[in-house]
Each structure stands twice: as C-alpha cells, then as structure tokens.
Image: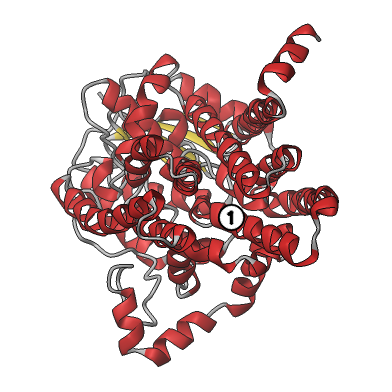
Amino acid sequence: MEISRHLRMKLGYKVYILIAILAYTAIFSIVEIMFYRSFIIFTWDLGIFNQAFWNTLHGRFLYYTTETYYARTGCFLAAHFSPILLIAVPFYAIYPTGETLLVISTFVIAIGAFPAYAIANFFLKNEKVAVMLGILYLLYPLMQGVTLSGFSPESFAGTLFLFILYYLVKADLKKLALVFPLGLMTHEASAPIIAFIGIYGMLYHRSVKNKGFQASLIILITSIPYFFFAQYMRIFFGWTGQPSLWHEWNMIGATSTSDLPVKILLNPIGALNSLTFDWAAKLLYVTFLLLPFLFLPLLGLQGLIPAIPYLFTSLFSSYRLYYSIESHYGAFVAPFIFLGFLHGLVRLQRKSRLKTSLWKLAKLTLLVTVTLLVILLPLIYSQYQVFNVDEKKNNVVRSFISRIPQNASILTQSNIFPHVSNRPCAYTIAPPIWNPEYGRIDKQILQNLSKLDIKYVLLDFSSEPAFSSTASLIYTDFIIPNGNRYSLINAKDGVVLFCLKT
C-alpha cells in the first residue's frame, strides 16, 4: 500500500496507465503463450522471426528460410524493410524462443497506452478521463487483433505512430526527431502513413511560422523519398520483385500499393468492382472500427487523415485480412481511429458544452468497448479451436521434437515450425489451401529441398485442415519421391517422424 501511495503521489493518474501496461503485458503474454503451445495459432510469422533472430545471434543477419520466393538472399529485410526489429534482438538473446518474442511484442503494443493517454490529456485537459481513454485504447478490439497475431513489425508501428502524433501536436521537436525515424524504420508501408501524419500536423498547426507546422512539413517531404529508399533497400537485401501471391488488387490491374492510385484512375470500373468486392465484410470491418468509439470519429474527420493510406489500400483489396479486425494490420489504422475519436470529443465539447458529462461519455465508451471485446474475442479465435486443445496429442508432438538434436536440419509443417525454427536449417511450406498459387510454389520448394540432406521430417496428419494439408503435401512430394532415403522412426496419434538414413 505504501508503494502504491508513493507512486500515486509522484506520478498522479499516470500510475494507472503504468498498471494497465503491465497488466496487459502479463495477461496477454500468458494467453499468447498458451495459444502458441497449442500448435494451432501463430503458425507462420512467429516462426520466421524466431529463425531470423536466432540466426542473427549466430552470425547470419536476419536469415530465414521460408520465403525465398520473395527474399532471394534469405534476409528478412528483403521481404519488408523493418530495421526496427534489431532493437528487439538483445532482449530476444536473453531467452531465444518464440515465447520471448510474444512477450516483447505484447509489451511494445501495451506501451501505446502511454502516448494514447498523453494525447487524450493534451486535447481534453482532463487527466482522469485521459487515463480511462488510454486504457480504452488497449481494449480496442483492433489492438487485440494485433496482439494475438503474434510478433510483427506492425506491433512497433502502432505505438510509434502515437508517439509521433503526440510530439507533433505538442511541437516537442527533440523527442519528435527521435521517434520519427524509428517510425519510418518499422515497415516500408509506414512511410505513406507517416507522410499523412505530416499532412495532419500541417492542418492542425495551420500557421507556416509555427514550428509544429514546419516539423510536419519536414515529416511529409522526408517520408515520400524514404518510401522509395525502403523499396531500394529491399532490392539491395535480395527482394525478387515478385508480386504477392494473393493478387490483392488484381481487379484493378495493380500489383502493389505503389501503382494502385494510377490504376484506379485508369480503371474506374475495376476500382468500383474492387471496392464493392466482399462488401458485407468490408462494411462490417468499418463498423467495428467505429462502433467501439460510438462512431464519434465521424465527428473528428481531421484525426482520420493518417488512416487514409491504409483504408485506401485495404478497402480496394480482395485480401480479407486487410479488412479484418483479427490481423496485425490493425496497427496501421487503430491509432488514427482513436485520434478521430478525440477530435470528435473535442468538437462535441465545444458545441454542446459537455465538460461536465465527459466522464460519463468516456465510461459509456469503455463499457461498449469491453462488451464488444468479450463478445468478439471468443467468436474470432474459436476458429482456431484454441479453447479445445488436444493436450494429449500436443504432448506427442513435443516428445517427437525433443528427439531432434538442436543442430539438426528439419522440415515440418507451419504450425510446428515456430517450435523448431531456432536453428539455421529449419524448413516449412505455406498451407497449400491458403491459395492455389501457394500449392504451386510449395511443390517447387519441396523439389528444391529434395537436393538437401534434411535430417528430420516431422508431420502431424491429425492437425487442423490447413496444417494437415501441408503434412500431406510434404509426404506426397518430398517423402515418397525420396522414400529410399528416409525411414520412419516413430508414429503416434497421427504424428510421424522420419529420419534420413545414414
């Protein structure tokens, strides 16, 4: 009690933000680790980062094996230019496993509550309400989507966007000079978003003589060339230039976000068809963006300006994860929906003199958000069956993994891959049922892997359809063609382990 009282006196209401950050990190880290150990969720990106970080610690810079289709050299910076990831390497080195990455990612996301609180306090001049809104930001369903998607550069992006916004509206140029380049370093897709933050800042500060306006202008004119620099660096690190296998903007004729605006202008019919494609899901997505904040961001459209680049690319796409609340892409839009909400509150205060009822409105918003959170989380993540884990079968998988030496090469399906990826020679393929083209690429990868003397092959035919289909493809296109080279050394409950004959 004495410590709590001391912190309360020293930090004021900010102590509750600190408690919220620690509580969010602890609770969601535990939940994520439980999901991770279920062999059901976090099946692709986490394995990539676990391998890339492990190899970095062992002298192979961000090297991973799963996406040579995009990254010829095997360096992750070819797939996405995200040098911010190197900040996490020393913390990963303390305990180099996938669980560590999940804790790091969750903590980085949770830190976003602090700039969210600070921005709210700056606009509303009410610290008590600002604390509630900082906590509200963490409970926003999109943030759970980012958190439960595991480790990703987007985890850093969302938090840094908020810091950039805070120091920009305050015109704190020294701190802005620190967080601005860090924000650019999160992802090449962050550059257009930060450019629009610059536009927002210019409209907010208005006067050319204002140092905040001048800083905003610098952000704008710096972010645009940085975007092309990031693309060049991807090529430098080995990007093959291959378009996405999902063909997100195929209806318009665009192959990337770079040529999307031009293609929309040249093909307005295709653009309309693309925008209305899967319209019900897109409408539901926009509803879930705004509903937790009582649609008040519609009163604060100025705050939504930085959300334009992502909403533009996502709503014109045919890739559902771009317009879904359970993906890590929510980090590209959530901070600005929150900012729009704050602008909406300010406008409501000025027009209807709601200063005395601001606290009640904040409580109502929190209640709606928590209600949505309780309803949505089980619905969204029940698809992964994380609440019905077959622990007996999982123990079989773990026992098989324990038989594989740490330095041995291994090929496995993507849901097992994160658990064995902390080694240089771990391989997997994408679930072929994701997309027909993945099946084609998978066959090519397996053909190339047949030339290597991969020591172990671990498959689980009783797993989820996406993963069991991967196991079947590895068996038919790798084990059978190389049947004379591999022997079955163990099999139980649909889990099989093959070993290269000596």
The image shows residue 14 at horizontal and vertical percentages of 67, 29
From the viewer's perspective, is 484 left or right of 340? left
Colouring scheme, one of rainbow, by chain, secondary structure, one colour: secondary structure
Quadrant occupied by the N terminus: top right
Seen as rendered, the residue at the extreme left is 236
How many numbered discs, if any? 1
Q: Residue at x 69, y 27 (%)?
A: 23
The image shows residue 17 at horizontal and vertical percentages of 67, 31
In this rendering, the answer to whether 263 lies above or below 286 is: below
Q: Nearer the viewer, residue 154 or 406?
A: 154
From the viewer's perspective, is 179 left or right of 314? left
From the viewer's perspective, is 159 left or right of 250? right
Which residue is tagged 1? 339
Seen as rendered, the residue at the extreme front is 209
Quadrant occupied by the C terminus: top left
* Mark 1 surroundings: few (<14), some (14-19) or many (≥20) residues within 10 A: many
Q: Residue at x 55, y 61 (%)?
A: 303
The image shows residue 128 at horizontal and vertical percentages of 76, 37
From the viewer's perspective, is 311 left or right of 450? right
The image shows residue 409 at horizontal and vertical percentages of 30, 28
